[in-house]
């Protein structure tokens, strides 16, 4: 499949066992051999997995339904090095104050006609804007996933090891994290870069 061009609207589709779990709108910032970057604006539409009561699910059960939702009041820029088992998200509030860096552990992106698909690996890493401190997120969710047989203990250990590698890569600002992504803005925004 051909690459997407900057400004093109796509879908980021999280799947579980071949079924759609979540879909978010995105706008291509870059789609190059060394980096895929996708922007999601506040209030963008999304589709989420929900239980019969309509509440968003944390872990995949055997059955779920999809419900319409909205992205919270945040700007998200997902930066994915092709071949990696993670994406780095820069997350800003509506006034473009960087809230934190977020390492989302996930499968490598799979290109589709509509965008990209991936499988979330439950565990995440939250890094402060100045990168002076960080913490694991959703360790309890990963334990529940192992207990439920959704992933093996070995897979969970591999996810954690990938998180450590991704964090080390970010902290030393290795490519593609060596760019000033925290200063990126969509074209048309005050101080926007020409992407």
Image (tube, grey):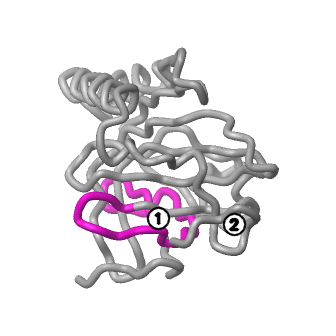
Q: Is residue 32 magenta?
A: yes
Whether residues under marks 1 and 2 lie with C-beta atoms below 8 angstroms apart, the answer is no
Q: Where residue 188 sits in the image (x, y, percent)?
A: 71, 74
Q: Mark 1 points at which residue?
A: 12
On the question of residue 67 being in view, the answer is no
Q: Is the magenta stretch mostly helix, strand or loop?
A: strand
Q: Name the residue under label 2.
A: 44
Report the disc number at residue 55: none
For this orientation, the residue located farthest to the right is 95
Q: Is residue 20 placed above or below 96 in the rendered structure?
A: below
Q: Where residue 62 sits in the image (x, y, percent)?
A: 42, 48
Sequence-wise, the earlier of marks 1 and 2 is: 1
Could you tell whether 46 is left or right of 64 in the image? right
Residue range highlighted in magenta = 13-36
Could you tell whether 64 is left or right of 153 in the image? right
Q: Which residue is nearer to you in this view: 38 or 116?
A: 38
Using the numbered discs, state the Cα–Cα distance from disc 1 to disc 2 in whole angstroms.
Answer: 12 Å
Question: Residue placed at 58% from the left, 65% from the top?
Answer: 193
Q: Residues within 10 Å of mark 1 (few under 14, many from 20)?
A: many
Q: Is residue 147 placed above or below 49 in the rendered structure?
A: above
Q: Where residue 13 sits in the image (x, y, percent)?
A: 44, 64
Q: Is residue 98 placed above or below 153 in the rendered structure?
A: below
* Secondary structure at numbered mark 1: strand
In the picture, the quarter occupied by the N terminus is bottom left
Question: Residue placed at 29% from the left, 51% from the top?
Answer: 81
Could you tell whether 74 is left or right of 145 in the image? right
Question: Residue placed at 65% from the left, 52% from the top?
Answer: 52
Q: Which residue is nearer to you in this view: 87 or 173?
A: 173
Q: Which residue is nearer to you in this view: 170 or 25?
A: 170
Q: How crowded is mark 2: few (under 14 residues within 10 Å), some or many (20 or more)?
A: some
Q: Is residue 21 magenta?
A: yes
Question: Residue placed at 37% from the left, 67% from the top?
Answer: 116
């Amino acid at each position: 499949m051909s690459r997407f061009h900057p400004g093109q609207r796509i879908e980021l589709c999280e799947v579980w066992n071949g079924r759609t779990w979540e879909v978010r709108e995105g706008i291509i910032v870059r789609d190059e051999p060394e980096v895929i970057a996708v922007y999601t604006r506040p209030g963008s539409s999304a589709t989420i997995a929900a239980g019969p009561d309509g509440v968003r699910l944390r872990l995949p059960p055997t059955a779920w339904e999809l419900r319409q939702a909205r992205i919270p009041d945040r700007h998200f820029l997902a930066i994915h090095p092709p071949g990696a088992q993670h994406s780095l998200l820069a997350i800003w509030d509506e006034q473009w104050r960087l809230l934190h860096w977020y390492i989302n552990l996930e499968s490598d992106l799979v290109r589709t006609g509509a965008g990209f698909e991936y499988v979330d690996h439950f565990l995440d890493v939250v890094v402060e804007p100045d990168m002076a401190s960080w913490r694991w997120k959703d360790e309890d969710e990963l334990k529940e996933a192992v207990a439920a047989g959704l992933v093996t203990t070995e897979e969970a250990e591999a996810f954690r090891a990938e998180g450590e590698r991704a964090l080390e890569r970010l902290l030393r600002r290795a490519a593609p994290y060596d760019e000033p992504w925290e200063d990126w803005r969509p074209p048309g925004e005050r101080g926007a870069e020409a992407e």
